[in-house]
Amino acid sequence: MDKRLRQRFEAMPLHKLRPLPDEILKLIKELESGPRREIDIVTEHSEDPALVARILRTEGDPNGNDWYQIERIYCSPEKCPNCPHGDYRFRYQRNKRKKTIRKKFIAKMVFDHETIERMKKHIGAPIATYEIRPKKD
């Protein structure tokens, strides 16, 4: 269990904790019977490089120990009609001793990559600037 979630549960009185397992199981059944959610797709996404549809942006040095990537992913090798999914931000951490790379989902991007690039193109120098100075007595 996630450390923060555990701390929240430990802070709750037992009479509020006891009904939670039934409520959680009911919610899980409801979610499983509906369409597959984006959060489930991205968190179940394996670290198989073949499922990365496109790396849109890299922040940091991929040859270093810690970097971020904005990616679009395929949900499975079969690729559903909505593939690719994203844009998602992932954190990569390299463990040089174990020679492994850990990939962790951070967030779904608010704006897609194309919108951000379009906005960057239209940023220019300010039209006018001014300075506010205090009045001299």
Image (cartoon, rainbow, N blue to C red):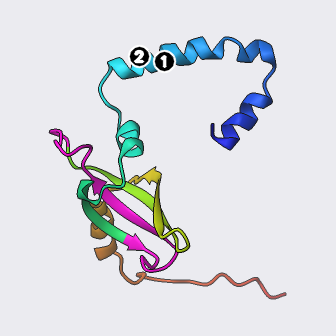
Q: Write down the residue under mark 2.
A: 30
Residue type beneath disc 2: Glu
Residue 103, quarter of picture: bottom left
Percent position of residue 80, x then y: 18, 39
Residue type beneath disc 1: Leu
Instruction: Provide the residue span drawn in magenta.
Output: 58-82
Residue 44, quarter of picture: top left
Vertical comparison of 88 with 55: above or below: above
Q: Which residue is more in the foreground, 132 or 47?
A: 47
Residue 123, quarter of picture: bottom left
Q: Write down the residue under mark 1.
A: 27
Residue drawn at 34 percent across, 69 percent down: 57
Quarter placement of the N terminus = top right
Report the label total. Answer: 2
The question of residue 63 being in magenta is answered with yes
Percent position of residue 84, x then y: 22, 49
- Dominant secondary structure of the magenta stretch? loop
Residue drawn at 40 percent across, 52 percent down: 110
Q: CA distance from mark 2 to mark 1?
A: 5 Å
Vertical comparison of 137 with 20: above or below: below
Q: Kindly identify which numbered label has been placed on residue 63.
A: none
